[in-house]
Image (cartoon, grey):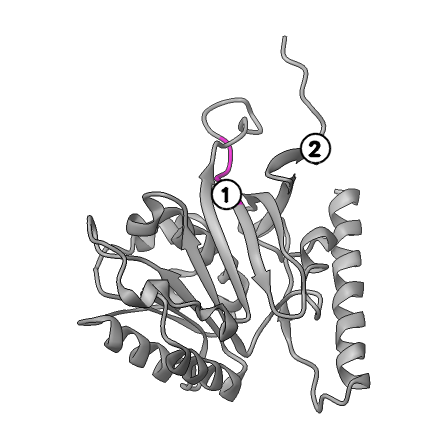
Amino acid sequence: MEWRMAGSREARLAALRGRIAAIEAGTRTPTPVLPFGDAAIDGCFPGGGLPLGAWHEVTGAGLEGETGAAPAAFVGLLLRPLAKTGAVVWVARRADLFAPGLAGLGFPAERLIQVRARDEAEVLSVLEDALSTQGVVAAVGEAEAPDLTAGRRLQLACEKRDGLGVLLHRRPYGGRAGAGSRTVSGSASFSRWRVAPEPSGAAPDDIGLGPPRWRVELERCRGGRPGGWILQAEEAGHGPHPFRLVSQLADHDVAPAEPLRRVG
């Protein structure tokens, strides 16, 4: 518990330093951020956390590019703190978002608004409208990479109300990646993430599976630096942050961040 509190304190200090730097640079108002609560992660961002008023790309590894299961769970948990203050709109072409699964991660299902779109263009259009709507704190759109024009429109929509936009990359089942997915849209998004499932650890009572884990890689971050971690879901009542850092990835290897347990 002491280690977590220390990490959270370092994260708050990093966020404060970022806001002070923004003010000194002449920014009228500091950009609000969504911190992870650990200095090892929040230190990768210039403001000490994932900035609001911007949109971010999340993609999966392997078949996750089609199913989107692990990235969707990661995004749902990431948005859990924001969902306590407003609505979260989730736009998709397929009606396969499992809301009870998000609720099992502590996401307040009553704050979720699901929208089914006809095609990629409508996904992006609804996502843009949602981010411009009062009361919506975040919006997720399941689509392939937008072109730069659509990316700029999303950014402007995020800036209107300091909303957090997430583009969850998904392609049709068994389908080939479209032309849009080959577009380098990272120049429009603030950050780009790659998420894959990771085996769970032992349960606290040694019965059943432990909390879900993800292998998360921050591939690019505007004004920041990349990084990689194994993150574990935290229960909603265990603090303000939805993730706990289990291990840090260094050169594609795992650097232990928790003590080994003796068996037997």
**Residue density around tag 2, few if under 14, some if 14–19, many if 20 or more, within 10 Å:** few
Q: Is residue 113 left or right of residue 108?
A: left
Q: Amino acid at mark 2?
A: Glu
View extreme (left): residue? 118
Where disc 1 sits, the SS reads strand
| Image vertical order of residue 21 relative to residue 180, above or below | below
Q: Which residues are magenta?
A: 210-215
Task: Estimate the x, y position of residue 143 in percent, counting from the top left.
Answer: 31, 65
Q: Is residue 249 left or right of residue 3?
A: left
77 or 26, nearer to the observer? 26
Badge 2 marks a residue whose secondary structure is: loop
- Residue visible at 30% across and 79% down in the picture: 126
Which quadrant of the figure has residue 157?
bottom left
Q: Which sits earlier in the primary sequence, circle 2 or circle 1?
A: 1
Residue for point 70% across, 82% down: 30
Q: Is residue 88 visible?
A: yes
- Whether residue 249 appears in magenta in the rendering, the answer is no
Question: For the point 38% across and 61% down, which residue is it?
Answer: 168
Q: Pinpoint residue 189: horizontal percent, then vertical percent.
A: 50, 72
Q: Tell me whether the residue at label 2 lies in contact with that at label 1, contact meaning CB atoms closer than 8 angstroms.
A: no
Decide if residue 152 is on the left or right side of residue 43.
left
In the picture as drawn, the residue positioned furthest to the top comes out as: 264
Instruction: Identify the residue shown where x is 80% and y is 64%.
Output: 13
Relative to 143, 88 lies left or right: right
Q: Which amino acid does the dot numbered 1 rest on?
A: Trp
Q: Which residue lies under the disc numbered 2?
A: 258
What residue is shown with label 1?
Answer: 214
Q: Position of residue 69 (x, y in %)?
A: 35, 48
Circle 1 packing at 10 Å, graded few (<14), some (14-19), many (20+), is many
